[in-house]
Each structure stands twice: as C-alpha cells, then as structure tokens.
Image: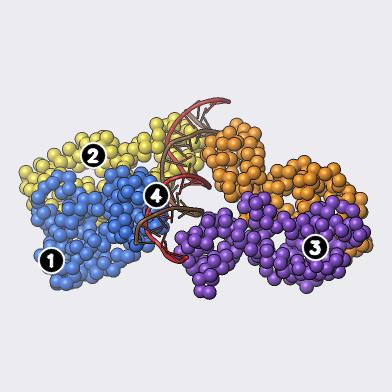
Chain colours: A orange, B purple, C yellow, D blue, E brown, F red
Amino acid sequence: MVEEDKKNRIFKAALNLFVEKGIDNTSTYLISKEAGVATGTMYTYFKNKVELINELYISIKAENLTVSLQDLLKSSLSYESIEKFWIESVEWGVNNPDKFRFMMQFNSSPYHTEDTEAKFRDFGKNMVKLIEDGIQNKLLKDLPPKYIWELFSAHFTFTVEYIIQTQTKERKIFFETLLDGIKY
Amino acid sequence: MVEEDKKNRIFKAALNLFVEKGIDNTSTYLISKEAGVATGTMYTYFKNKVELINELYISIKAENLTVSLQDLLKSSLSYESIEKFWIESVEWGVNNPDKFRFMMQFNSSPYHTEDTEAKFRDFGKNMVKLIEDGIQNKLLKDLPPKYIWELFSAHFTFTVEYIIQTQTKERKIFFETLLDGIKY
Amino acid sequence: MVEEDKKNRIFKAALNLFVEKGIDNTSTYLISKEAGVATGTMYTYFKNKVELINELYISIKAENLTVSLQDLLKSSLSYESIEKFWIESVEWGVNNPDKFRFMMQFNSSPYHTEDTEAKFRDFGKNMVKLIEDGIQNKLLKDLPPKYIWELFSAHFTFTVEYIIQTQTKERKIFFETLLDGIKY
Amino acid sequence: MVEEDKKNRIFKAALNLFVEKGIDNTSTYLISKEAGVATGTMYTYFKNKVELINELYISIKAENLTVSLQDLLKSSLSYESIEKFWIESVEWGVNNPDKFRFMMQFNSSPYHTEDTEAKFRDFGKNMVKLIEDGIQNKLLKDLPPKYIWELFSAHFTFTVEYIIQTQTKERKIFFETLLDGIKY
DNA sequence: CATGAATGAGGCTTCATTCAT
DNA sequence: TATGAATGAAGCCTCATTCAT
C-alpha cells in the first residue's frame, strides 16, 4: 500500500530545500528529514538524487505548462490570446515562487540535460509554429520564430522575478514591453 | 611576471572547469591540476573556494562593465547611445562565452550573495538614474526604472545566449525588440 | 506442492546468484526477485541471510555425500571401491558445477563455521576410520589418516574444477595421480 | 615526502583484517583505524577498496614466487629440484599463514579477475614448460602438463593448511604423496 | 503464510582545507 | 611563497531486516 502521499512529501521537502540552499548544498539526508521519512525511503521512490531532481523538474514544468497552455493552442493567435497566455503564466509563477525559482535553478544547472528537456520538445515546437503563423499574418515582426519564443520566455522569467521581489500588482504595462518589442 | 601569472592560471582553470562541469562539480583539486599548481597554492591566493568563486565573478563582471560602460555614462542618453551600449555588451558576451556563462551560472547560484553584488551597486544606481532621465525626457516609457534596467539585463543575457547558439550575425533587429518595448 | 516449491525456488535463485556474483555481492532483494517471491517471504523460510547460506550449503553437501557414499561404507575398502567413490564424486561435481562451486566458495568464506561443519563430523570420522583400516591392511601408506582424507578431498576438488574448465573426458588417469600418491 | 611506511601499514592492517573477518566484512573504516591513518588516507595510496585488495594480492603473490622460484628455473628439472621447490614453497606458507590464507581467500573471491592473474601468466607458462620437459625426459607421467601444474598447486595449498592446523614437523612424507602421484 | 514499503545503520568515497617541509 | 600528503566530516547509496496489512 504505497503512501502516494510520501512521494509528495519528498517532492515538497526537496523543493523547499533546493530553493533555500541550492540543489548541490542540499543533502539527501536533509531532504529525508524534512520529508519525515528515512534516508533509504527516498530510494524507494527515486533511483537516486539526480532522478529526484529531474522528476521534480518535470512535474513542475508540466504543471506550469498545463495551467496556461490549453487556451492558447485552441484559439487562433491574437494579441489578446498572447496576453492572456503571458499573464496566466506570470500569475502561475508569482503564485508559485518556489516552483518557479527551482525551474530557473534547474535550467542553469548541470542536471538540465537534453534528455529531460526532450520531454517538452513538442510544446516548444508548437509554440514556434504558432509564432510562424503570427509572422505570416503580420501580427509579429519578421524575426526568427525561435528568437521570439525565447525572448518571450526570458521576458516572462525576468518579469516574474521582478514581481515576486517588488510585490507590484502591475501586469499589463509589463506585458506591453514585450508586445511592443515583437509586434509588427 | 612568471609568478603573478599563477593567480591568473588559477582563474582560467577555474573558469574553464566551472563552465564545463558546473561550479559544484569542480573540485579544488581539479582546478589546481588544470592550473598546474599544487592544491595548497590556491590557498595562498584565495581564502577558500567560495572566495575564489566570488573573486572570479567580480573580476569578470568588472571587465564586462568596463568594456562597454565608459561611453554611455559620459554621453547624454539617446537611442543611439543605448544601442551602442547594448551592442558592445552583447559583443563582449558573444566573444567571451565562458565568462558570460560563468556569470549566468554564478547569478543563479547560492554563491551570489548580496555582499558581492553590493560591489556593483553604484553601477546599477547610475543606470537607474540614467533611465530616470530618459523617462523624464520622454525617451522611455513611464515604467519603474528598475524594471527597465532589469529588462535590459535580461534581454541582453538572453540575446547573447541566443547568438552564441545560433552563430547569427544579426544584432540590430534583436536590439529593436528591446527598444520598441521600452521607448516612449 | 505449489507452495513447498517456494523454498526451493529461493534455494535455486540463491545458488545461481551466489555462484555468478559471489555471496556478498548478492542481496536478499535480488534473491527474492530471482525467486519470484517478496523480500519478506525469504524470512518465513529462513531466519536470516546467514541461515539461508548455511542451509543451502548443508542441503548441497548432504546431496553430494548421499550420492556417492552408500557403496563405499558398505563394501570393504579396496582400490576399486576407492576409485568408484572418487569417480562418482567427481562425476557429481562435474554435473553440478554450480553446487560444486558454491561449496568451494562457502568453504573459504566467513560463513563456514565449525557449527555447520559439525553436521558432517560423523561422515569425516567414518572416512578416517576407513582409512585407518586401509593403513593397517597395507593398502595405504602409513600417513596421518586425516592427512590422507584431506588430500583426497583437495585432489577431488581440484580435479573437478579442472574437468569443468577443460571439458576433458579423462577420469582414470587423474585418479591414479591420487592413488599412486597414497597407496602402500 | 611520502611515508612509504604508511602504505605498508595499510597493507598490514588490511591483511590482518581480511584474514580475520573476510574481505567483504572488513570496512575501509576499520582498515584505516587499524592502520592508524585517516579514512581518506587510504585513497591517497589506492584508488579504491578493490584496488587495495588486488595490490595486496599481487604484492604477496610476487613475494611468494620470488622466494622459492629462483633455483627451480635455473637448475635442470629433477626430483630433487622439485622437492626443494615444493618444500620451500610450503615453508613460506607455513611461516606466513596470513599471507597464505589471504591468497586462498582472494583466489575464490570475485576480486580474482583474469586481469590480475595475467600478471603471473609468465610464471605459469614457465612452470608448464618445465613440466613438459619433465614428461619428455620420462621424469613425469604423460599427463596434461597443466593438470600436473595445478595438481602441484592444489597439493601445496592443502598441505600448507594441514601443517598450519596440525603444527606437524613432517614435510618429506607429504611431498611424496605428490611425487608418487605424478612421477613416471 | 505472503507481501513489499519502510527503515536506518553502515559502507565507500570525495573533497575543502591544513600544515610541516 | 609553494608544495602535496594527510585529514575527517559529510555525501550518496545499499541492503538486511521488520511489520502492518
């Protein structure tokens, strides 16, 4: 009778500690203690620390994408749908600062392998396609679609961090620094 | 000359290894070996590993700023001077990918303390002041100056990474995604 | 029938793995998996791993002795009866290389306690008595009977290993290197 | 300034403990403690535990061979030279019971790889050649030379163990059980 | 009897740092 | 200054064993 709960407790403990102390400065012992399980228990749920880190990332990124993605892919692209997507994404980040920051940390860590990112390949491709359409329809500047997509991501990331730190309620004016930069 | 060399050899070895394997996966032993010095020698130049990391960061960031800063602070703010600054910064990053990437890695690491960042506080303040002027002179949108400054940094960072990866020769069109986003 | 089977499946799994990977490199988990039972199940049949090892040894050694012993103890000692015993023993080893090798491994392991060996004390005593008779009857050299018995064992052991490795069909010429060494 | 002494202390501690408790039941911590060094020190001298085990074996086996080998290979083969070699070998084993027993333990352990044994390949080949000569000169029975050589080894091994246990002073009569078994 | 998740002691190894030379 | 052998705390992980179901 697996306490599915336990895996979640490990996830939560790891997330807290990774954000607080950094991934490499968080020992498996500390994670176990924080999760209220024995050291060995972690290894019932994860093959090793690296796999825990990656599974944590994957689960968070999946959550992140699920939250704000549905609408965008269904509707046709418009400034409004882009804004909605951007704002929902930002809101998710602001409301989940630990998850957000862990993703950032993970992205610039050696744990961020092609292998893991491959799981989200399709999503990226879809975004690029959407952007290509936007360019053809003269919604967006004629730039490399991949550049636009990565600018979008970078702008999103930085804005979330800014909002978390300043606790500002503004959203729309920030979005416009992105949109004005890329719209046709 | 032969000997002052040693500190630099340690810096270079550390930089290479940090970028290649990550800071936490690089042992001081490995740095020493790569630098061609004894393990103990590192400790005549740096109090410990953390200090080496921070000094390396400081020296690189200083170089980065020095390169492109002079002109900007002297001239009055204009779209041209902003562009010049941005492009020179980007060029530095593209030409020094290891240094650039180490800075990124450092920024999202637990070694990135207030203490170290304080060394560049003045620079940031100057930039914010410049931006405030820009806002007053209706060159830039009326946004929090700190937001604009951090957007600038984020945009710069992401663009360098993009250029390194794609090896594109484009610059101006990328800059315009920034400028169009923030100009009045 | 279905269930008594389980103890045997554990025995077989353990035997295979012990020979393949060594006793200490075989975890109880692996044995369970290979036997197709749960980890806990092992402990309903054996008090612990050490006891499993010893019971396995005892069952194999008993089988080994049973096979070739009957005749020898009944007949009066002669070169022919010795040869028959030796050859039957060798044949058993050659046909049961895993069992044979596990016994060797067990003998030079810390699990090989007096306690376990005591179970076969009687057998050894009988052999020594037989040999004493052989010496008195001028069949065998006047050497310490225990020496002869242990030489017999060592010679048997080494020959089995040699035959397993070389796959030779020879038997008698090998036996003669033993008999010529000890006969009167 | 390497204390070459220290490597020897580790060797001796390991040897004692391996014989007393078995290789796999001896922790690196225990070896360090017994050797009077820090846990990490072992790793200055040996890459890991497996390498320590193998180097220990190699050094002991080399010593063993060196002791008794010189004469045999120089003189022409005769019953006397064989006897001399056998007795000197036995004497070495009896006088170095721990080294002897460690070699036995190593031989039937998973650490005994082809790789390590390859170091002594030449020696084995020389012995086989010598035996081939002995067969041609009708000193020895016409058996596979490798069989004779391995019988020699097994006989030697078992006899040393017997002498250690019984503390007997006999030698020659034991040798004769070997020689009578293989001489022409 | 059987299960297998959970336990936590203990094993091997790394590595930042020190210090005698 | 420079060296590098030595240190030992601390990290990751395994595994024999237990126990609630």
Q: How far apart are marks 1 and 4 (CA)?
A: 47 Å
The numbered mark 4 sits on a residue in which chain? D
Crowdedness near tag 1: few (<14), some (14–19) or many (≥20) residues, C-alpha within 10 Å:
some
Q: Which amino acid does label 4 sit on?
A: Thr
State the SS at label 2: helix
Q: What residue type is labelled 3?
A: Tyr
Q: Nearer the viewer, residue A114 or B11?
A: B11
Q: Which amino acid does label 2 sit on?
A: Gln
Answer whether residue A71 is visible to the viewer in this image: no
Q: Distance between the residues labelled 4 and 2?
A: 55 Å
Q: Nearer the viewer, residue B172 or D145?
A: B172
Q: In which quarter of the image is residue D81?
A: bottom left
Tell me the residue at 81%/69% (across/down). Answer: B84
Query: Up-down: is A63 above or below C41?
Result: below
Crowdedness near tag 3: few (<14), some (14–19) or many (≥20) residues, C-alpha within 10 Å:
some
Q: What residue did someone put label 2 on?
A: C70
Q: What residue did someone put label 3 on?
A: A147
The numbered mark 3 sits on a residue in which chain? A
Q: What residue did someone put label 4 on?
A: D39
Is B13 positioned to the left or the right of A81 in the image?
Answer: left
Crowdedness near tag 2: few (<14), some (14–19) or many (≥20) residues, C-alpha within 10 Å:
few
